[in-house]
Image: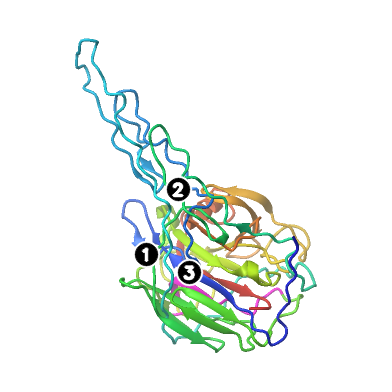
Amino acid sequence: MAIQRPHFSTSVIALLAGLFLACSVQNNGAGGGSGGASGWGGTTASGGTNASGGTTASGGTTSSGGTTSTGGTTASGGTTSSGGTRATGGTTASGGTTSSGGAGSGGTTAIGGTTASGGTTASGGSTGTGGRTGSGGSTSTGGGTSTGRTTATGGTIATGGTTGGGGTTGTGGTTATGGNTAGVACTDASTTALAFTKQYQDGSIAVTGSTKTYYTMTNWWHKFGGQTVTLNGLSMTVGNSQGTSVPSTDGNPMGFPSIFIGAYQGHTTVGSNLPKQVSALTSVPTVFQTNASSLDTSNMNATYDVWFTATGTALSSRASSPGAGGAYLMVWMYKPADRQPRGGSGTATGASPNHPAQTVSGVPGTWDVWVDSSTDPPCISYVSSTPLDGLAYDLNNFIQDAVTQKYGITTSMYLSIVFAGFEIWSGG
């Protein structure tokens, strides 16, 4: 069904909102640090078409009478009982009565967790001048909205996943309207509120009950005409009462209001565990939830902008890109009807993704992959084939897929900064 939406070129205030939550960036051997990837999340239960928390590893299937298979750890679901071991060589009347693999129930999988809401910000600081968008130009000259755009109302809810013999799973939870979830639990919360009205404003967000912090920036680096950014904890709302916009011929958005973890423009968050080498990453669970489907999505996106650097040294306070030998990775919840990511095949306007309808292990749905390798650092953009309001997932699944597919990220690079926010060409 086509939904026509205005471009908000009048004095009507359009509010684009999202909530951003993060869990832990984890590494092999050394344990997980706090921080993780950023995300926007409503109160999504991570049920949805869940990758983890869905199918358990055979529920703790025991080898017949001996020690159990490791089946063991369910996807975020707990570990199965050891399955019981029988005495090897024990003689009984009938050759030794073995326990039939033990009575391990297989463990109960977790429902994926409920994200927390809120977050606080402080004010101050300056932002950088960056922003990654489809510099290849616009896909159409019109201001039309996404034709036939449909959202997944509630996502596909897994019933807890298929368990092996004996293992019971949780119900899988419920997803937020328009979003699919992938079974991650993020519980960061904050209570700070800020209202930004300037082109460059920023502040730190303290996590309740923790030393961990996030950081937020308005960053209207390309065009500013009175856009507002309001922070309520980890929730961001963007307004554009003056209807500021850039023309369809301009590939750059007005800016990229976002929340991030890592070190950028002289601001370093606490507890991010970054930079972290790609080869050492095991999990970067994250949640991102917006109200985008209720607004005009033809000229804005909701996206992650993830920076990889060539070394483990934090970027300088003046750096506006990951630098040579690094890379950008973006995850778009949807493609705006009138805009496109960098790269693609075909003409600069109206190009097609380099790798359409790809599956990513552990992530629901299919993803159109756009690769711009004409620059150093390259930019790899994963765009959901079906528009989503949000997603709860493990960012490391995209990172490792990009490594495996040789799109431009390598295991020797370092995950350094994770931004989540809105690239806006018009509207708010």
Q: Is residue 383 above or below residue 4?
A: above
Disc 1 to disc 2: CB gap under 8 Å? no
Tell me the SS state at disc 1.
Answer: loop
* Left or right of 350, for residue 216: left
Q: Is residue 157 above or below residue 243?
A: above
Dot 3 alpha-carbon crowd within 10 angstroms: few under 14, some 14 to 19, many 20 or more: many
The tag earlier along the polypeptide, 1 or 3, is 3
The location of residue 311, given as percent across then percent down, is 44, 64
Q: Quadrant of residue 1?
A: bottom right
Question: Alpha-carbon distance for marks 1 and 2?
Answer: 32 Å
* Left or right of 317, for residue 210: left
In this view, the residue in front, 60 or 255, is 60
Residue located beneath label 3 in the image: 20
Residue located beneath label 2 in the image: 171
Q: Amino acid at mark 2?
A: Thr
Tell me the SS state at disc 2.
Answer: loop
The location of residue 338, given as percent across then percent down, is 74, 69
Residue located beneath label 1 in the image: 273
* Quadrant including the C terminus: bottom right
User: Over which residues does the magenta segment extend?
Assistant: 251-266
Dot 2 alpha-carbon crowd within 10 angstroms: few under 14, some 14 to 19, many 20 or more: some
Dot 1 alpha-carbon crowd within 10 angstroms: few under 14, some 14 to 19, many 20 or more: many
What residue do we see at 73% from left, 70% from top? 137
The location of residue 344, given as percent across then percent down, is 70, 59
Q: Amino acid at mark 1?
A: Asn
What residue do we see at 37% from left, 55% from top? 27
